[in-house]
Amino acid sequence: MEEGGLAAGKSTAAAPGAWIVFQDEVGQSMTPPRARTWGRVGRTPVVRVRGRGSGRVSMAGMVCYRRGKRSRLIYAVREYRGRKDEPKGFGRRDLRGLLVRARIQLGGPIVLVWDNVRLHLTAGMREWAAANVHGLTIFQLPAYAPDLNPREGIWSLVKREVGNLAAADLTQITKAVKRRLKQIQYRPDIVDGCLAGPGLAIDE
């Protein structure tokens, strides 16, 4: 396992046949995000929210690129309903499981690019990465640089899906999130577009 920073204007040589994988996590609560929609001139559209209770839908995902291969989206979704001892989001074991699933599905070495959130920097996560030295190279994005992560484009598309959703409960939000992520999985052109958005490209 190699680990280092990824700075603007720099590049690194990946192992032959390696997948470039950008990973990130995000959440959606019962409060819908702001979104654009059509409305009459001079009248601001209002979406009334009838949902009750609290909760959060957490999403962890990876966009995967390799020259000559179809771009891939691998993700996991978890609900948090505020119950006692219930995890609020993804933990170290969840993240490790997602990485293992990615390696199995992609069938090749991975160059992993992610940010500097605490979960990625914990001793347990570092120890696991060190124990999986074969086929895994990790690079960390600069601090406060979400614009460099193509995964942000996927989150934007998902949040647009739930932007005008007046959900009655958390389950409805979860279904909408999963439906949109599944749609994107079958559209590698959309995943490619998220790579082009930050001005990135997979070179020979």
Image (cartoon, rainbow, N blue to C red):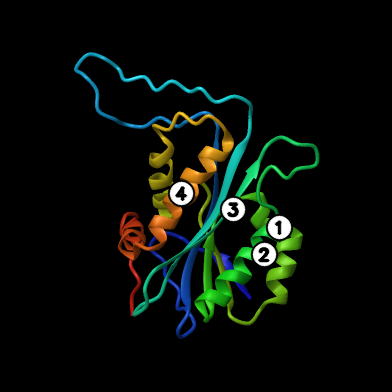
Query: Which comes before the other along the chain, label 3 or label 2?
Result: 2
First in residue order: circle 1 vs circle 3: 1
Residue contact between numbered discs 1 and 2, judged by CB atoms under 8 Å: yes
Asked which secondary structure carries label 3, the reply is loop
**Badge 1 vs badge 3, beta-carbon distance below 8 Å:** no
- As rendered, which of 76 and 197 lies closer to the eye? 76
Secondary element under disc 4, as helix, strand or loop, is helix
Disc 1 versus disc 3: distance between alpha carbons?
A: 14 Å
Q: Amino acid at mark 3?
A: Asn
Q: Distance between the Cα atoms at labels 3 and 4? A: 11 Å
Image coordinates of residue 183 in percent, x first then y, are 39, 56
Question: Quick one: SS at disc 1?
Answer: helix
Tag on residue 116?
A: 3
Disc ID at residue 111: none
Q: Quadrant of residue 69?
A: bottom left
Up the image or down, 40 lies above or below 142; here it is above
User: Does the rendering let one see residue 150?
Assistant: no
Reading the chain from its start, which is encountered first: label 4 or label 1?
1
Residue at numbered disc 2: 96
Structural crowding at the residue carrying mark 1, measured as other residues with C-alpha within 10 Å and reported as few (<14), some (14–19) or many (≥20): some
Seen at 46% across and 44% down, the residue is 176
Q: Residue at x 49, y 67 (%)?
A: 21
Disc 1 designates what residue? 92
Labels 4 and 2: the sequence-earlier one: 2
Which amino acid type is marked by label 1? Arg
Label 4 to label 2: alpha-carbon separation: 22 Å
In the rendered image, the residue lying farthest to the top is 42
Disc 2 secondary structure class: helix
Sequence-wise, the earlier of marks 3 and 4 is 3
Name the residue carrying label 4: 146
Give, as a three-letter code, the residue at label 2.
Answer: Arg
Disc 4 vs disc 1: which is toward the camera?
1
